[in-house]
Each structure stands twice: as C-alpha cells, then as structure tokens.
Image: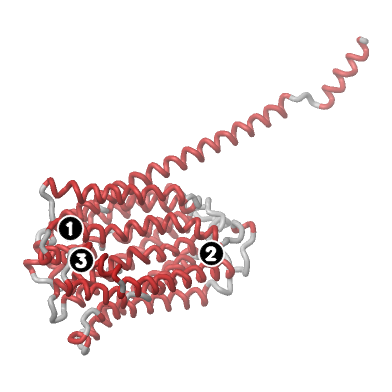
Amino acid sequence: MGCSEKLITLKKKFELLKFQHMITSEGIAAVKEDAVEMLASYGLAYSLMKFFTGPMSDFKNVGLVFVNSKRDRTKAVLCMVVAGAVAAVFHTLIAYSDLGYYIINKLHHVDESVGSKTRRAFLYLAAFPFMDAMAWTHAGILLKHKYSFLVGCASISDVIAQVVFVAILLHSHLECREPLLIPILSLYMGALVRCTTLCLGYYRNIHDVIPDRSGPEMGGEATIRKMLSFWWPLALILATQRISRPIVNLFVSRDLGGSSAATEAVAILTATYPVGHMPYGWLTEIRAVYPAFDKNNPSNKLVNTNSTVTATHIKKFTFVCMALSLTLCFVMFWTPNVSEKILVDIIGVDFAFAELCVVPLRIFSFFPVPVTVRAHLTGWLMTLKKTFVLAPSSVLRIIVLIASLIVLPYLGVHGATLGVGSLLAGFVGESTMVAIAACYVYRKQKKKRNENETATEGEDSAMTDMPHTEEMTDIVEMREENE
C-alpha cells in the first residue's frame, strides 16, 4: 500500500495548507476601512463566483479519468477555453446590470455600500474561474500518471504566493485606493503560480510520453460528448455545493431583518468557513484515489504492474483519513480558546468577534463524516464512469438545506449558527443519496455478474451433457445392427 500512502500523505500536506479564503480574509481584515463590511463584500462575491463558475474546476476529474492522449487533452482544454469566455461575460453582466443589483442588494438585504463593493469584487474575479479550471484539468492528468508530488507542490506554491502578495500589497497604495484588490490580486497570483507549475509539469513529464490518440486498450478515444456526459453530474453537484453558501447568506440576512445585523452575520460566516473547512476540506480529494489506483479502470497505468493496492486498502485508508480529520476538528474547535486564537492571529478579527464564531466552528466538527462517505463513493462511481446516478444527490442537498433554513429559526436558531447547521444538514442529505445511488449500482453489477455466471455455467453444463463423438458412433452402430 506504499503508493496509496504516499499519495494520501502528499494530499494531506497541501490540502491542509490550502486555505486560500483564510489568507484573503486576513488581507481584508488588515485594511483600515470597515473590516466587517469588507469581509461581507468579499464573502458574497467569492461565494457567488464559486457557484456560477466553480463547477469548471471539477474538470480535474475529466483529466483524471478520460485524458489518455494528446488529442484527449486538446479536447479538454478547448472545453475550458469556451467555458472561461462564458464565465467572463457572465461576471461582467452581473457587475453592471440590474440583475446583479437584484441578486446582491435586494435578495441579500445588504446596503448600497456593501452591494456596490460586492459587484465590483465580482467583476475583478471574472478571469479566475478560467485559470482555476485550466490548473485543475492538468492536475487531473498529473494525478492519473502518479505525479501527486508535483500537484502538491503546485498547491503549496499557490498558498505561499498568496501569503507573499498579501504582505506586499498591504504596504502599497491599494490599501487606501482599492482595498478589495489586495485579496483578489493575491488570489490571482496564487492561481497563476499553480497553473504555470502544473502546465510546465505536464509538458515536461507527460506530453512526450502519451500517444497522439487513445487505443482500445485504454478505453477508446474520449469524445467531447463523453467528457461532458461524465462531467455534468459532477458539475451539478459542485454547483449545488457552491450555491449553498449564497443561499445560506441570503436566508441568514433575511432572517435577521436589519442590515447591520445581516452584515455581521455574513461576516461571521465568511470568517468561520475557511477555518472550519480546513480540517476536513482535503477529504474531498479521496475521490481521486479510486480512479488513480483501482484496477477496474482500463486506462489505469497500474493495471499491468504488480501493485498491492486493492479496494480493501482504499477503504482502510479512507477510514484513517476520516478519523484524522475528526480528531483535528475536535482539537481545534472544542479545546478552549484555540479557535478564538486562530481567528484573532490569522484572520485578524478582534476577540469579541472571534467569540461569536465559536459555536459555528464547533458544528463544523461533524462535517468529516458525510464528506468522507460522499468522496469515497463518488470516487468508486467515477471509476465505473457512472456519475449520472449522482445527480439526484444535489437536488436533495438543496431541498434539505432550504428546509433547515426555514425550520430552524422556529426552534430558536439564528445567525451564523443557523447557516452552518443548515449546511451540515445539507451535507448529510447529499451523502445519504450518494450512498443510495452507490447501493443501486452495486446491486445492478452484482445481478449482472450473477447472470453472467449462470449463463457460463449453463454453457459448461450443456457441453458436459453432450455425448462424446465415439459414444455417438457406438449408439448409431447399435441401432443399425438392431434394425
């Protein structure tokens, strides 16, 4: 299980470090303007961007499962170029049209100042989805060929670049002229470093090794239609995950009624989400293990090797990751004053504000369980290329999320606690539906396997029951003698 352990160790290293939102939040909180207002503006813009264009980042799984040749890679990149252009147009439309004013100002019940800053930040983020998608597409190809170390280095470089540029830009004139550009430019620089590292890694290690076209032994040539059919259920799931935060922001803002209280609640959610996400966010990468190591994948490079990685190893590894994440959550969020210290020292908020974040952060402690179940089963279904059965889980997640946001206020739950509690309920609902879908596929496979075994046994039995040629000849001769 050496290869699997190596992959998991590397992923834990860079995923635990990769808390981009936290770094950018620190850049916002450090400026001289109203930190709460700036946090709310950036949080709304970032969460809306991740909803509208974030699903493109899930093209990483297309690179992981489908890209076996230069031609396949060209098709994947072409899809991302078109999607990036559409995203840029959409961001511009939201920033300047009445639709953006309605979505941001009216629906979220924020004042004019927060609304205008949010739309401006949304415009500045127009090119980020394209860069992110290009980076993750090549990350999927590199993971397919077991270059997880390079993927980890790229993500660590992303974080380092963001930290460096936040520190540099805080001493520039942007702090006074346009504070929102400090976190956004840092986000872009990190993405640029990551994308450049992954693209160079692809050209150096893989481009000259893979064939121009995929042969039948690799599962056949991937078409754009196959890629999109595989990708859209994953994109739908990711879109519902991204829309969850805007929906939470919307309901929490409207539940509180007042604009100042709504701004404070959104700011708490913006500050707590990256901290709460840090101990379990890397668990989503578990779904890459099945396609990369499971021998049922025809394009897997390990099919013809003596690898000792089996499905049992992957299950054990998944359980260990979940246990580690749960331990981290409870140590960070239930140990007195630890979570407050993280928020004060890293995000840069005051202690009174940090105390308001304690209860939401403790709710995050229970997220690793549904996230692990979802990631593990999704990886198995990706290997079988049966992602279409995952689509209903996204619908159930939204239904449960909205139902929780409506019901919990009647039970006395409000503010950020309402938001995080509803997110947890949505996660549980989604994971339950993924488990049901996996059971459905497993039963179909088992039934098909039994039918094949029955058919094989029937053929063997028919061959066994037929008399040998010599016996048939003797029978014919005996009949002739009797006649």
Count neighbours of disc 1 (C-alpha within 10 A) and say few if under 14, some if 14 to 19, many if 20 or more.
many
Which numbered mark, 3 or 2, is in the foreground of this view? 3
Residue on which disc 1 sits = 252
Whether residue 250 is situated above or below residue 95 in the rendered picture? above
Secondary structure at badge 3 equals helix
Q: In which quarter of the image is residue 354?
A: bottom left
Q: Along the polypeptide, which appears first: circle 3 or circle 1?
A: 1
CA separation in Å, label 3 and label 1: 13 Å
The residue shown at (32%, 55%) is 321
Whether residue 256 is situated above or below residue 30 in the rendered picture? above
Q: How many marks?
A: 3
Count neighbours of disc 2 (C-alpha within 10 A) and say few if under 14, some if 14 to 19, many if 20 or more.
many
Which numbered mark, 3 or 1, is in the foreground of this view? 1
Count neighbours of disc 3 (C-alpha within 10 A) and say few if under 14, some if 14 to 19, many if 20 or more.
many
The residue shown at (88%, 18%) is 476
Amino acid marked by disc 2? Val
Q: Are marks 1 and 2 in contact (CB under 8 Å)?
A: no
Amino acid marked by disc 3? Thr
Whether residue 11 is situated above or below residue 157 in the rendered picture? above
Amino acid marked by disc 1? Val
Q: Quadrant of residue 34?
A: bottom left
Which disc, if any, is residue 270?
A: 3
Residue on which disc 2 sits = 67
Position of the N terminus, as image quadrant, is: bottom left
Position of the C terminus, as image quadrant, is: top right
Residue 33 in percent (x, y) is at 13, 80
Residue in front for this viewpoint, 376 or 435:
435
The residue shown at (63%, 66%) is 213
Secondary structure at badge 1 equals helix
Q: Can residue 433 be seen in this view?
A: yes
